[in-house]
C-alpha cells in the first residue's frame, strides 16, 4: 500500500540526475530569523538553500549555528521575518502536515503502545483523522509494514519504555513516516545512540530513503553520518547561520558501511571538518 | 505489562523454598504493634493519669464501650470527607486543566490561588456557618476547600511541562491546542493528578474534622469535642484512632487507584 502511495515520488528518484532545478521540494531564499523581538538574537541570516525532490540533504555546522531554527522554518513552526520559505510549491505561513519530524529525543508517549504511538500523527493530520476510525485496519497494517521495514516486527504491542534506545528511535522514524510525508526532517536523530546502533540505523534510514523515495533533510553534528547518507551536504556558518558551502556527495548508491574506510570518504569528511573548524574560528 | 507476566512465570521456583517471614511486608504491622507497646509501657511506667494520656489498652476499652457512637460518627465524617474530596477532585481537575491551558491564565490565577490557599480554613468555617448553617454542608465545603489546591497545582504542572519536542512534532502536523491537550497534556498529567489524590484525601480529613469540631452536631470532630468537655479523654483518643484508620484506608485506596490507572509511570524508565 505504501509503495503504491509513494510511487510518484519514487519514480522521481530513480531517474535522479545531478540536478533538477524544476523539482525543488524545499526552497529557502534570503531568510532572516530573529528570536525575541527587534533586539533579539539573530539565529539565521541570509539563509538560502534548495533541496530537490527525493534528495537526501544533510546540514552540518558548528553548534549553535541555527540548525534547529532551519528545522522549524521548514516545518512552518516559525515564520521568518525576512525572506521566503517555499515547500512543495507553497509559501510556508503555518505548520504544514506534509512534513514528518524526528528528534534526538524519541518523545514516545509512555502510556501508548509502540503501535499506538506510531498511529498518533494520523489522529492529528487533517487528511487522515476523519478516516482513521473507519479504516483502522488498513492503517494498522501500514504501521506494521513500517515496523517491519525498520526491523521492529512484532514489537508494536510493547510499550516504548520496554524498548532500547535504538529501538525507540526506530519507532520514532516509523511515527515520522506514517502519514506519508513528502519531506522528512531529522534533527540529530542518532545523537544519543552508541556507535554500532547508530551505524545500524544509518542503514535503516538509507534503505527507507531508497524504498520510499521520501525527501530527507538531516541535521547533524556527525560528519561521517552526513557523508555516508546524504546526496548533498550544506555547511552552515556560526550564528547567525547561513550556508557557507554546498557539497555534492559523489558516492554511488547503494552505499555500504565499508565505504567509510575508503580514502575518498575520509577526504570528504576531512574537508568538511576543516570548513567547520574554520567557521568556528571566524565566529 | 508484558514484563510483569514474564516475571511471574519465574516465581514458582522461588516459592518452593521454605516459607520465610517477609520482613518488609510484616514491618508495618510490627512497627504499629511496637508503637502501642512502647506507649503502654511508658504510660504504666510513669503512672500518667488517664485524663492526660490514656494507655492504648484503656483506649481500646473505650472503643469497645462506645462502639455505636464511634461507628455512627465515623460514618458521618467519612461521608463528609469523601463528598468534599469528590468535589475537590472534579473541581481541582477542572481548574487545573483551565490553569494549565495557557501561560497567561497560569500567570494570572496562580497568585490568587496561593493567597487563597494561605488563608487558614478555620477562619473560613464561621463564614460558611453564616451562609449554610451548621452541620454537614460546611464540613463538606471545608474538606473541599482544603483539598482541591494540591490537585489543581499538580494537574497544572503536568500540563505545563509537556516536552517542547513533542509539542513541535504535533504542531508541525497541524495539531491545535485542543489536540495537544487531549493527546498529550491530559494523559501526561494523570500521574501527577493521581499522586495528588493521596495528599488531597488526608487534607480532606483535616478540613471535615475541623469544621465538625467548631460547627456541627455530628461527626468525629464533634464527638471528640464533646468528649473532651466531659474529660472523657479515652474517647477523644478513640476518635483519633478512628480517624487514623479511616485516613490510612482512604490513602491506600488512592495509592491503589494511582497504581492501577498510571502503571506506565511507575514502570517506565521514562527514557529521555
Image (tube, coloured by chain):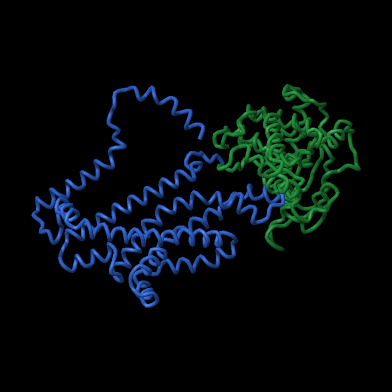
Chain colours: A green, B blue
Left or right relative to B65: residue A26:
right
The answer to whether residue B256 is above or below residue B132 is above
Can residue A276 be seen here? The reply is no
Picture coordinates of residue B258, whole percent (x, y): 45, 47
Picture coordinates of residue B84, whole percent (x, y): 40, 62
Left or right relative to B84: residue A217:
right
Residue found at x 28% / y 64%: B221
Q: Nearer the viewer, residue A228 or A161?
A: A161
Query: Which image quadrant for residue A19?
Result: top right
Can residue B123 be seen here? The reply is yes
Query: Which image quadrant for residue A234?
Result: top right
Q: Nearer the viewer, residue A230 or B5?
A: B5
Picture coordinates of residue A31, whole percent (x, y): 80, 53
| Image quadrant containing the N terminus of chain A | top right
The answer to whether residue B147 is above or below residue B26 is below
Left or right relative to B156: residue A62:
right
Q: Nearer the viewer, residue B262 or A277?
A: B262
Picture coordinates of residue B242, whole percent (x, y): 26, 55
The answer to whether residue A265 is above or below residue A78 is above
The answer to whether residue A119 is above or below residue A16 is below
Count of numbered marks: 0
Q: Residue furthest bottom?
A: B130
Residue found at x 55% / y 65%: B107
Amino acid at each position: 500500500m505504501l509503495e503504491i502511495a509513494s510511487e510518484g515520488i519514487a519514480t522521481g528518484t530513480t531517474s535522479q540526475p545531478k540536478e533538477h532545478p524544476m523539482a525543488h521540494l524545499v526552497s529557502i531564499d534570503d531568510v532572516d530569523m530573529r528570536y525575541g523581538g527587534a533586539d533579539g538574537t539573530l539565529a539565521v541570516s541570509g539563509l538560502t538553500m534548495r533541496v530537490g525532490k527525493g534528495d537526501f540533504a544533510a546540514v552540518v555546522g558548528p553548534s549553535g549555528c541555527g540548525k534547529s531554527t532551519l528545522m522549524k522554518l521548514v516545518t512552518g513552526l516559525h515564520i521568518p521575518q525576512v525572506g521566503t520559505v517555499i515547500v512543495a510549491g507553497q509559501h510556508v505561513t503555518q505548520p504544514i502536515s506534509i512534513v514528518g519530524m524526528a528528534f534526538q529525543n524519541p518523545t514516545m508517549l509512555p502510556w501508548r503502545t509502540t503501535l499506538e504511538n506510531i498511529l498518533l500523527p494520523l489522529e492529528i493530520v487533517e487528511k487522515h483523522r476523519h478516516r482513521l476510525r473507519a479504516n483502522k485496519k488498513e492503517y494498522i497494517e501500514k504501521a506494521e509494514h513500517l515496523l517491519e521495514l525498520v526491523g521492529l516486527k512484532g514489537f508494536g504491542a510493547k510499550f516504548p519504555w520496554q524498548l532500547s534506545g535504538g529501538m525507540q528511535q526506530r519507532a520514532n522514524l516509523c511515527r515520522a513516516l506514517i502519514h506519508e510525508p513528502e519531506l522528512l526532517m531529522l534533527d540529530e536523530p542518532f545523537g544519543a545512540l552508541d556507535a554500532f546502533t547508530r551505524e545500524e540505523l544509518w542503514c535503516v534510514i538509507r534503505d527507507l530513503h531508497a524504498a520510499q523515495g521520501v525527501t530527507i533533510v538531516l541535521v547533524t553534528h556527525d560528519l561521517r553520518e552526513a557523508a555516508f547518507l546524504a546526496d548533498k551536504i550544506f555547511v552552515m556558518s556560526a550564528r547567525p547561520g547561513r550556508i557557507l558551502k554546498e557539497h555534492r556527495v559523489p558516492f554511488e548508491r547503494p552505499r555500504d558501511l565499508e565505504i567509510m574506510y575508503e580514502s575518498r570518504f575520509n577526504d570528504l569528511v576531512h574537508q568538511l571538518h576543516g570548513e567547520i573548524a574554520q567557521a568556528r574560528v571566524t565566529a | 505489562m508484558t514484563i510483569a507476566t514474564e516475571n511471574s512465570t519465574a516465581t514458582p521456583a522461588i516459592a518452593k523454598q521454605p516459607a520465610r517471614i517477609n520482613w518488609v511486608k510484616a514491618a508495618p504491622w510490627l512497627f504499629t504493634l511496637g508503637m502501642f507497646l512502647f506507649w503502654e509501657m511508658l504510660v504504666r511506667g510513669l503512672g500518667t493519669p488517664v485524663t492526660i494520656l490514656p494507655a492504648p489498652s484503656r483506649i481500646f476499652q473505650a472503643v469497645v464501650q462506645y462502639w455505636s457512637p464511634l461507628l455512627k460518627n465515623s460514618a458521618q465524617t467519612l461521608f463528609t470527607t469523601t463528598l468534599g474530596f469528590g468535589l475537590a477532585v472534579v473541581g481541582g481537575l477542572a481548574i487545573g486543566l483551565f490553569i494549565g491551558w495557557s501561560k497567561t491564565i497560569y500567570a494570572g490565577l496562580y497568585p490568587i490561588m496561593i493567597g487563597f490557599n494561605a488563608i487558614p480554613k478555620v477562619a473560613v468555617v464561621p463564614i460558611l456557618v453564616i451562609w449554610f448553617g451548621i452541620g454537614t454542608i460546611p464540613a463538606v465545603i471545608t474538606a473541599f476547600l482544603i483539598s482541591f489546591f494540591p490537585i489543581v497545582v499538580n494537574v497544572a504542572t503536568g500540563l505545563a511541562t509537556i516536552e517542547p519536542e513533542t509539542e513541535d512534532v504535533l504542531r508541525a502536523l497541524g495539531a491545535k491546542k485542543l489536540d495537544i491537550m487531549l493527546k498529550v497534556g491530559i494523559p501526561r498529567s494523570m500521574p501527577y493528578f493521581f499522586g495528588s489524590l493521596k495528599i488531597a484525601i488526608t487534607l480532606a480529613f483535616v478540613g471535615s474534622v475541623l469544621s465538625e469540631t467548631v460547627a456541627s452536631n455530628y461527626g468525629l470532630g464533634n464527638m471528640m469535642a464533646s468528649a473532651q468537655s466531659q474529660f472523657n479523654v479515652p474517647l477523644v483518643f478513640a476518635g483519633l484512632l478512628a480517624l487514623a484508620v479511616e485516613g490510612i484506608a482512604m490513602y491506600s485506596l488512592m495509592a491503589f487507584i494511582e497504581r492501577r490507572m498510571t502503571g506506565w509511570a511507575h514502570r517506565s524508565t521514562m527514557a529521555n
